Image: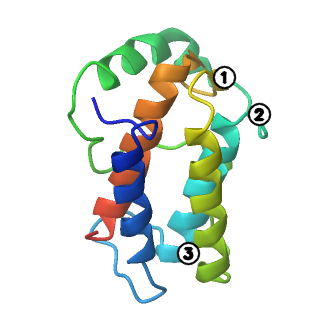
Amino acid sequence: MKTIYDPEIKAELLRRIDQLSENSTRQWGKMNAFQMVRHCALWEEMALGRKLYKRAFIGRIFGRIALNSLTKDERPLSKGSPTIPDLVITDNGDIAAEKLRWKTLIEEHANHPEKEHLHPFFGNVTGQQSGQLAYKHADHHLRQFGI
């Protein structure tokens, strides 16, 4: 299972992030490249426990089932996967600075494989699951931009 705790997998993700530019075009979804990068940086802050978001009621019911399904195999996240409202980005900014922030957060996350966190939909996420989700989430959004 791919995880950001694997140095080679992490390095591959960081190289892919470097390929993004403000001119990168989405292949699905609504976010532009900057918005996607900021969204992913906020996700990493959540995984590191720096941002806490209110649990979604539906997540309390189905979150554990969904988490187990997502972390049981290599299947990527599907196009159009829902996000929590707090991670919907509408502003724009400096993509280079935001890419650096995202990459720095990935590096920090990768150095804490034991770090558990509370996800607003999935609930309690173990360190192992967190590394897998971090990879799948980043991969999903990089594929969204053809990278």
Which of the image's four quarters has the C terminus?
bottom left
Pointer 1: what residue? 118
Question: Circle 2 — which element?
Answer: loop
Q: Earlier in the sequence, mark 1 or mark 2?
A: 2
Q: Are marks 1 and 2 in contact (CB under 8 Å)?
A: yes
Residue 17: where, in percent of width, then height?
Answer: 43, 68
Question: Circle 3 — which element?
Answer: helix
Q: Which amino acid, by three-letter code, is at mark 1?
A: Leu
Q: Earlier in the sequence, mark 1 or mark 3?
A: 3
- In the displayed structure, 141 sits above or below 51; it is below
Pointer 2: what residue? 52
Asked where in the image residue 11 lies, by quadrant, the reply is bottom left
- Residue occupying image coordinates x 38% and y 19%: 66
Pointer 3: what residue? 34
Few, some or many residues within 10 Å of mark 2 (<14, 14–19, 20+)? some
- Residue occupying image coordinates x 63% and y 28%: 120
User: What is the spatial separation of the Cα atoms under label 1 and label 3, in whole angstroms?
Assistant: 26 Å
User: What is the spatial separation of the Cα atoms under label 3 and label 2, in whole angstroms?
Assistant: 22 Å
